[in-house]
Image: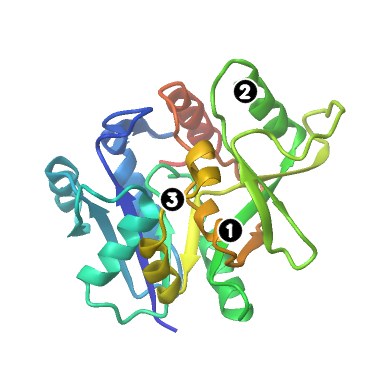
Amino acid sequence: MSVLVAIPARYASTRYPGKPLVALTGATGESKSLIQRSWEAATQVKGVDRVVVATDDDRIRAAAQAFGAEVVMTSESCGNGTERCAEALENLGGGYDIVVNLQGDAPLTPHWFVEDLVAGLKNDPDAVVATPVLRCDGRALNGFLQDRAQGRVGGTTAVFGHERHALYFSKEVVPYTGRNYADEDETPVFHHVGVYAYRPQALSDYRRWPAGPVETLEGLEQLRFLENRRAILCVEVDARGRQFWELNNPEDVPRIEAMMKEMAMA
């Protein structure tokens, strides 16, 4: 099955304008933009036929082309990354069996997250979308709770059923546990990793549906699939000792840079 990886990137982020061009300094002291680090993460994924940056901004296009990325221009009307991936696929003329949305704010995404995701979608004919989830240890969960207590969104959590089909995603910490965890403890909370694999028909359908009330309230694009009764497979991935964090706020830059240094990422 042919696989396209699209990295949607927009300059006019509500929470963090210009985020794709923010510089992140790695363990060697070298600074690279967020979009370059996300593209480099995508190129490490095995079994991928093509990687493109999908944007509507000339500044991002110029930066991406400067480090060798292929760019697909999309319209400013795209409301989120899923819509941008759908338009990018259309502009490329289709022809792919699976489209991966590797969001441009997750430069720490390990290649095996995406590989496991694609394999999961291939093996579940009832799912039209797949997305990775990572079981939180106490350190990660306590970080989420601290962020929420201080009015920040530290990440998204996922709840799923027996078949691992998603029941809900939230920027709040769900499910409620009612207890405290030490940093090394395993918890029942799953961090939703911002990567998606779609079947092409799912992307085509998504563009036809209006945003529903829950998607609008949470600001989570994947909820549109659930509101239209489409199955999202949650694929539990193994961090293998790697830390993971998305860049959502300016305060996340030093946190991610510290993680990169700790993991010796250049």
Asked whether 218 or 50 is in front, the reply is 218
Mark 3: few/some/many CA within 10 Å (<14, 14-19, 20+): some
Q: Residue at x 34, y 57 (%)?
A: 83
Q: Look at mark 1 in the image and give the residue it sits on.
A: 226
Q: Look at mark 3 in the image and give the residue it sits on.
A: 211
Q: Quadrant of the N terminus?
A: bottom left
SS category of the residue bearing label 1: helix
Left or right: residue 154 versus residue 1 is right
On the question of residue 211 being in view, the answer is yes
Query: For the residue marked with disc 3, what is the amino acid?
Result: Ala
Query: For the residue marked with disc 2, what is the amino acid?
Result: Arg
- Nearer-N-terminus badge (2/1): 2
Residue 69 picture location, percent across and down = 22, 57
How many labels, in total?
3
Q: Residue at x 48, y 45 (%)?
A: 108
Asked whether 117 or 125 is in front, the reply is 125
- Nearer-N-terminus badge (1/3): 3
Left or right: residue 228 versus residue 97 is right
Asked whether 31 or 21 is in front, the reply is 21
Mark 1: few/some/many CA within 10 Å (<14, 14-19, 20+): some
Q: Quadrant of residue 3?
A: bottom left
Q: Is residue 204 above or below residue 212?
A: below
Q: Residue at x 15, y 53 (%)?
A: 65
Between label 2 and label 1, give the one nearer the viewer. 1
Cα–Cα span, label 2 and label 1: 24 Å
Residue 50 picture location, percent across and down = 31, 71
Q: How is the image coloured?
A: rainbow
- Nearer-N-terminus badge (3/2): 2
SS category of the residue bearing label 3: loop
